[in-house]
């Protein structure tokens, strides 16, 4: 199998979504050492962090889509990973995200997730999308809600336990750039 | 376009090629079995796919990685072996896993690793390599010895996984050293 594949670069007003790279390993180690991992499977051994990054690239090779690394254009700050994500064992493809602490509170994750969702709809031709979220991850739930997604049902994963399935608005409902009603004025 | 076209290596009985999506099922059987205990397993079913994704990502990042061993006679994928250097490993490794007991005892992994070591020395320009082997994994220790490696008591070791004992670091000498 050829392992040659394309990872497009997406640009939004404030962000660049680019191919994951080994330089993201450092910020990821910091993230792994923080309490923020509790909603994405918990702390993992140090070696698992690098393997997780490698798996992001392998996901692109295997599926033709996957997680981008998100950088803030003005500062180069690494903000996290966002993208269409469908590892074996998932109930259906999702828009997944992991947001670094330094990127919180400025709508960065929403801007990136919206770009990723638009790409999944327009380029991959997805007709629907979910996001899988730990029931206690209130910040992620708030983000999903701002993106117009709604809690549909729960899904129990063999290893990760119960996750909420948030269903995003369909391509017709989710006009690019449009925000959910509760987001107006923010 | 990013990524790489992994080379295909040949031995008498094996074709060594890059991992493919279609290997996930055979690899899943191995990773779910007791044989995976020396590799941090056994693993849940969904993990095999992620391991496959990691193997491919390793190739993309490092420009080298593990080869799947395909038995020429049967066409079956029977194991994984190669130069391996995840970011936190103290140094580059020769790593291997033979997936089923039925393929043991015929020198297949020695055959594969002989070819892979040549690839590492000649094509990758490696000057040394280690193998991190659980002290209870006597079959792998025997293979390391057969390949000419010896324990290196002062080499750095990766952190042990989940209560496993410290691994033994086997040092593979570069062919030039061995000839000296």
Image (cartoon, helix red, strand yellow):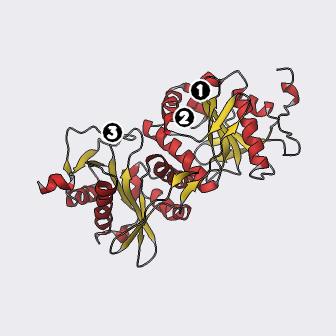
In contact (CB < 8 Å): disc 2 and disc 3: no
Give the crowd class for mark 3: few <14, some 14-19, many >=20 residues within 10 Å: some
Residue A160 position by quadrant: top right
Q: Residue furthest bottom?
A: B73
Q: CA distance from mark 1 to mark 2?
A: 27 Å
Mark 2 or mark 3, which is nearer to you? 3
Q: Which residue is mark 3?
A: B90
- When the figure is inspected, residue A99 is found, relative to residue A124, above or below; the finding is above
B14 left or right of B179? right
Q: Which residue is mark 2?
A: A42
Foreground of the two, A67 or B165: A67
Q: Which residue is mark 1?
A: A76
SS at mark 3 in the image: loop
Instruction: Give the mark, 1 or 2, whose residue is nearer the N terminus.
Output: 2
SS at mark 1 in the image: loop
Mark 1 or mark 2, which is nearer to you? 1
Give the crowd class for mark 1: few <14, some 14-19, many >=20 residues within 10 Å: few
B91 left or right of A3? left
């Amino acid at each position: 199998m050829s392992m040659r594949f394309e990872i497009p670069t997406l640009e939004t007003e404030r962000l660049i979504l680019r191919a994951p790279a080994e330089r993201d390993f450092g910020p990821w180690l910091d993230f792994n050492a923080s309490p923020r991992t509790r909603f994405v499977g918990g702390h993992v051994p140090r070696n698992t962090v690098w393997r997780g990054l490698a798996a992001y690239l392998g996901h692109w090779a295997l599926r033709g889509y996957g997680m981008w690394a998100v950088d803030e254009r003005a500062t180069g700050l690494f903000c996290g990973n966002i993208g269409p994500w469908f590892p074996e064992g998932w109930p259906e493809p999702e828009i997944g995200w992991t947001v670094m602490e330094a990127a919180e509170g400025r709508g960065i994750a929403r801007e990136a997730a919206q770009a990723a969702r638009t790409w999944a709809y327009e380029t991959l031709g997805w007709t629907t999308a979910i996001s899988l979220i730990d029931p206690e991850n209130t910040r992620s739930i708030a983000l999903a809600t701002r993106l117009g997604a709604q809690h549909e049902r729960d899904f129990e994963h063999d290893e990760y336990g119960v996750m909420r399935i948030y269903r995003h608005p369909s391509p017709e409902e989710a006009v690019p750039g449009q925000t959910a009603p509760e987001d107006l004025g923010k | 376009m990013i990524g790489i076209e992994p080379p295909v290596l040949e031995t008498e009985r094996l074709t060594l090629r890059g991992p493919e999506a279609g290997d996930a099922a055979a690899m899943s059987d191995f990773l779910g079995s007791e044989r995976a205990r020396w590799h941090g397993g056994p693993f849940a079913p969904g993990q095999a796919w992620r391991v496959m994704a990691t193997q491919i990502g390793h190739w993309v990042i490092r420009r080298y990685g593990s080869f799947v061993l395909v038995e020429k006679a049967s066409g079956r994928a029977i194991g994984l072996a190669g130069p391996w250097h995840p970011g936190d490993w103290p140094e580059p490794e020769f790593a291997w896993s033979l997936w089923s007991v039925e393929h043991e005892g015929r020198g297949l992994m020695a055959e594969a690793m002989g070819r892979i070591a040549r690839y590492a020395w000649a094509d990758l320009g490696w000057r040394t390599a280690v193998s991190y082997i659980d002290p209870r994994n006597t079959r792998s220790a025997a293979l390391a010895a057969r390949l000419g490696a010896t324990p290196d008591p002062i080499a750095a070791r990766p952190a042990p996984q989940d209560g496993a004992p410290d691994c033994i670091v086997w040092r593979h000498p570069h062919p030039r050293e061995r000839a000296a």
